Amino acid sequence: MSESNTTDFTNPSTFILLGIPGLEMAHVWISIPFCTMYVIAVLGNFTIPFIVKMEKSLHRPMYYFLCMLAVTDLVLSTSTLPKMLSIFWFNSREISFSACLTQMYFIHCFLVTESGIFMAMAFDRYVAICDPLRHSVILTNSIVVKIGMGVLLRGSILVLPYILVARQWPYCRTNIIPHSYCEHMAVVKLACAEIHVSNYYSLSVVFCVFGLDPFFIAVSYTQILRAIFSLPTKDARLKTFGTCISHLCAILAFYIPCLFSALTYRYGKNMAPRFHIIIASIYLLIPTMLNPIIYGVRTKQIQDRLLRLFTHKGT
């Protein structure tokens, strides 16, 4: 092992990201679906805010939250994929210590933020269906902005201790990270220090965010379903429930990969490390790619605006 990997250091100048260990020869092939998903995610998540801005009929809380979701997805995908692709294509594995911690912060901060946005969108659906006459009073533009700032602030505050603690630890084992990006636990394991406090804190954040947020979403949808089933006709029930389908699909696309990745990391001890890394990489990409597709396919107003846009350009 080279001297740079064995020398004691408290703040290494660089870390070395291995990409997907064991699959180095296949990195170029693996990059093809990853690059495709990234391009779709970027195009889709740029298109959603553009359409909402252009179409005045979409200037409503539901679509403002959708724009927040699109921006969050852009940050999530862009904080990981460019560096990942540089590893796959150019074997550019070095990442500075500060850049690694910055990447870690953005990944985990915006994962928490995205979960908060889904919770806010569930609240919007609850008010729109269960108390429609007061929807415009409860969810004013200023309230939507405050909710957006609140979920971002929550993510920023909850994740900040990850970085502050990781920056203070000594790293005397190695500066090689067997991962495709600076995932929190992958970096933590390199520290020559007692990391139980960090582990407990990260678990508490996971419980508070990915336990409580889905719980509140489930409570909202329980009330929504009760209101839907109380409607007098089947057509009314289907039409009202149809307004929630895209949101439910996006929630499933976000939480299921996160849950699967967490379970395989905690309990899939016999699984090869490369599968853990592939799953951890994909779960950051799949929701960011699927969200604009789901809302584009399921939301008639967005479809109509896109059709008008392309039709106008074609004439």
Image (cartoon, rainbow, N blue to C red):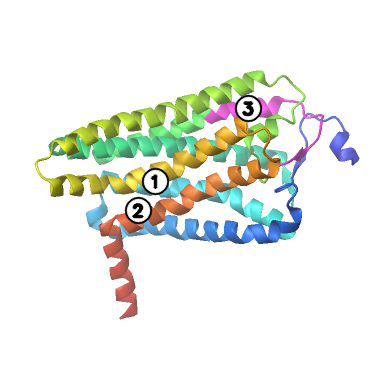
Q: Is residue 177 left or right of residue 109?
A: right
Task: Confirm whether residue 143 shows in the render.
Answer: no
- Look at discs 1 and 3 and give the one toward the viewer: 1
Which percent across, then down, holds residue 173? Answer: 82, 30
Q: Which residue is mark 1?
A: 250
Q: Amino acid at mark 2?
A: Tyr
Where residue 67 appears, as percent x and y from the top left, is 37, 49
Q: Are marks 2 and 3 in contact (CB under 8 Å)?
A: no
The residue lying at 56 percent from left, 34 percent from top is 262
Q: Is residue 120 left or right of residue 10?
A: left
Earlier sequence position, callout 2 versus callout 3: 3
> As shown in the figure, which amino acid type bears the numbered disc 1?
Ala
Report which quarter residue 144 is drawn in. Answer: top left
Residue at 75% x, 48% y is: 22
Give how far apart the Cα atoms at labels 1 and 2 are.
8 Å
Of the pair 305 and 20, the residue shown nearer to us: 20
Quadrant hosting residue 153: top left
Which quadrant of the figure contains the C terminus? bottom left
The span picked out in magenta is: 159-179
CB under 8 Å between discs 1 and 2: yes
Between marks 2 and 3, how big is the CA–CA gap?
Answer: 37 Å
Q: Left or right: where does residue 298 sit relative to residue 76?
A: left
Residue highlighted by disc 3: 164
